[in-house]
Image (tube, rainbow, N blue to C red):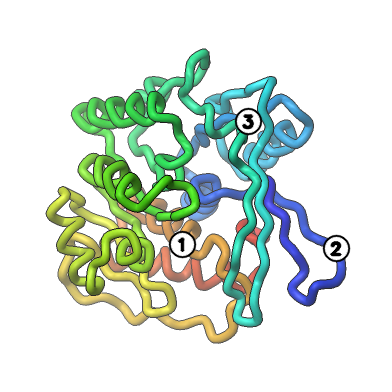
Amino acid sequence: MIEIGLPQDGVGLARIGFAGDVANVAIYLKRAGPASEVAFVTALGTDALSDRMVAFFGEHGLATDLVERRPDRAPGLYAISLDAAGERSFTYWRDTSAARTLFEPPCRVTPAAMTGFDLVYLSGITVAVLGSTARTALRDFLGDFRAQGGRVAFDSNYRPRLWPDAATARREIAAFWVLTDIGLPSVDDETTLWGDADADRVLARLTAAGVTCGALKQGAAGPRAIGWDGCLPAFARVPNPVDTTAAGDSFNGAYLAALLAGASPPQCLAAGHAMAAHVVRFPGAIVPP
């Protein structure tokens, strides 16, 4: 989406950028693992801002040949407001965004276009914005994809405003958890959606769903491993974060880069936490290289 960063003091100029949860993960995955080939799959318009966005992805090393272009649509838009502690709140304009038409016919890009990938990453926001036909097509593809040896990584990234009600969100997100190999959720999202009492309950539920590895993100408290019970390193806190936007996304990108490089679970967690700790020191979702 188009990102508008509002000045924290209420004066001055807004900052314009491009971001979005899955896009952020793709960029930080490529940044942390430059040897990986990373493609971003989405739908955009044919307007000037969409052209700039495609160019922006290319500048960050992402393949863009699986970006659907819709002449009658444009990108979504959101504004970020920050409080004194760097915590963010969002205002969205995305109900008619091009991304909501991804995989909807007529289309050039279908889920089958990802055949041959080693890993597919998606989020609860992906699931929420897709239409029911596209959601079913993606779910069916991922089942076949895993049967052929592909791996699926998923972050539930629950955003209540994107769903008609919590029951629908639980049903749809649960259907993707059972297709997930690598789980990368945040404890706050999971407890809000499912009512789990604590992180232990979250981990037990995800393991029961078949998630075999990953990380449960706990903000400044540091992550916990999914599917691994060994000793973990100490995770340093960031004393004065500037902007927590994309903290979880950058964690996911660096975690996946380490995992794809063959790192151990503690090393993957440490890589994710270090990237997130770096990113929250800067304003905006995509920080300077």
Work out whether 144 lies above or below 28.
above
Residue type for callout 3 = Leu
In the rendered image, the residue lying farthest to the right is 12
Residue 104: x and y, percent? Answer: 48, 21
Q: Secondary structure at mark 2?
A: loop
Give the labeled residue for mark 3.
44
Q: Secondary structure at mark 3?
A: strand
Q: Give the camera-side residue of 200 and 120.
A: 200
Residue at (34, 56) in percent of width and height = 184
Q: CA distance from mark 1 to mark 3?
A: 24 Å
Earlier residue among tags 1 and 3: 3
Give the labeled residue for mark 2.
13
Q: Quadrant of the N terminus?
A: top right
In the rendered image, the residue lying farthest to the left is 208
In the rendered image, the residue lying farthest to the front is 165
In the rendered image, the residue lying farthest to the top is 106
Q: Quadrant of the C terminus?
A: bottom right
Q: Which of the two marks, 1 or 3, is nearer to us in this view? A: 3
Earlier residue among tags 2 and 1: 2
Q: CA distance from mark 3 to mark 2?
A: 26 Å
Give the labeled residue for mark 1.
248
Q: Is residue 168 visible?
A: yes
Q: Which of the two marks, 2 or 1, is nearer to us in this view? A: 2
Q: Give the camera-side residue of 108 and 201.
A: 201
Q: Is residue 34 visible?
A: no
Work out whether 129 lies above or below 206.
above
Work out whether 75 lies above or below 111.
below
Residue at (45, 54) in percent of width and height = 159
The reply, left or right, for residue 6 in relation to residue 204 is right
Residue type for callout 2 = Leu
Q: Are marks 1 and 3 in contact (CB under 8 Å)?
A: no
